[in-house]
Amino acid sequence: MQSCITIEQLEPPEIHVLRLGHRPERDKRITTHVILVARAFGARAVYIADVVDEKLEQTVRKVLETWGGKYFSLIMGVNPRKLVKEWKNSGGTVVHLTMYGLPIDEVVDDVRKSKKVLVVVGAEKVPRWVFEEADLNVAIGNQPHSEVSALAVFLDRLREGRELSLCFPDAKMYIVPSAKGKKVVRTG
């Protein structure tokens, strides 16, 4: 297996992601990509606000069974305002990714000092309370862009690229990097 680090070696801060506005009939691919990025970049959990989507849960379960990530959780149907309040009351930092926020390079060092971070990403229009209750509104550029790309860039900057060496010891398959072709190894 390639040289890698575990989630325990990657932390702190502990990272969780809150997905707002998931519409199962319209957002299944984008929300799936938010979850995949969160897991691959070392988040511990993704919370889906207000909605339970069984197909999304099945997809994530298959990814975890095949590619690993027993530490990772998907929690659906949460009350987002309650979660944000509880997160802040427990000493965590709430970061809302929005093109209207402060540039990431101005705030990422402060975020790294947190023990645990809840990263909020929206789908449809984000309610005003999120902007007001977040500890930081952070921009990955000030142009319209995807929440998937914003999450990936934010997590990469926060982890300083260390997450790219993250491995999952419970994986049934892993990829062997190669300049040409594809090589996937099955374990056990």
Image (cartoon, helix red, strand yellow):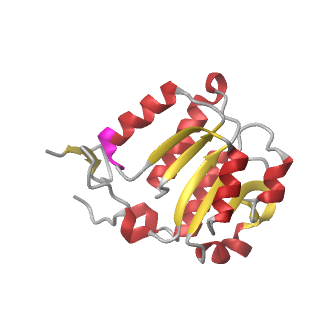
Q: Residue at x 13, y 44 (%)?
A: 188
State the extent of the magenta-drawn residues as a range.
Answer: 65-69
Say whether residue 121 is visible. Answer: no
Snapshot quadrant of residue 115: bottom right
Q: Judge whether 149 appears above or below 157 on screen.
A: above
Q: Residue at x 45, y 63 (%)?
A: 163
Snapshot quadrant of residue 156: bottom right
Say whether residue 149 is visible. Answer: yes
Residue 179's x, y, as percent? Answer: 33, 53
Residue 26's x, y, as percent? Answer: 66, 25
Q: Judge whether 142 appears above or below 58 on screen.
A: below
Q: Residue furthest top?
A: 25
Along the line of sight, which residue is nearer the eye, 47 or 67? 47
Q: How many marks?
A: 0
Residue 18's x, y, as percent? Answer: 62, 48
Residue 140's x, y, as percent? Answer: 71, 59
Q: Residue furthest left?
A: 188
Main SS of the magenta part reads helix
Question: Image quadrant for the N terminus?
Answer: bottom left
Snapshot quadrant of residue 106: bottom right
Q: Judge whether 93 appears above or below 57 on screen.
A: below
Q: Residue at x 37, y 71 (%)?
A: 9
In the rendered image, residue 20 lying in the magenta stretch gets the answer no
Along the horizontal axis of the image, is 146 left or right of 113?
right
Along the horizontal axis of the image, is 89 left or right of 98?
left
Along the line of sight, which residue is nearer the eye, 120 or 109? 120
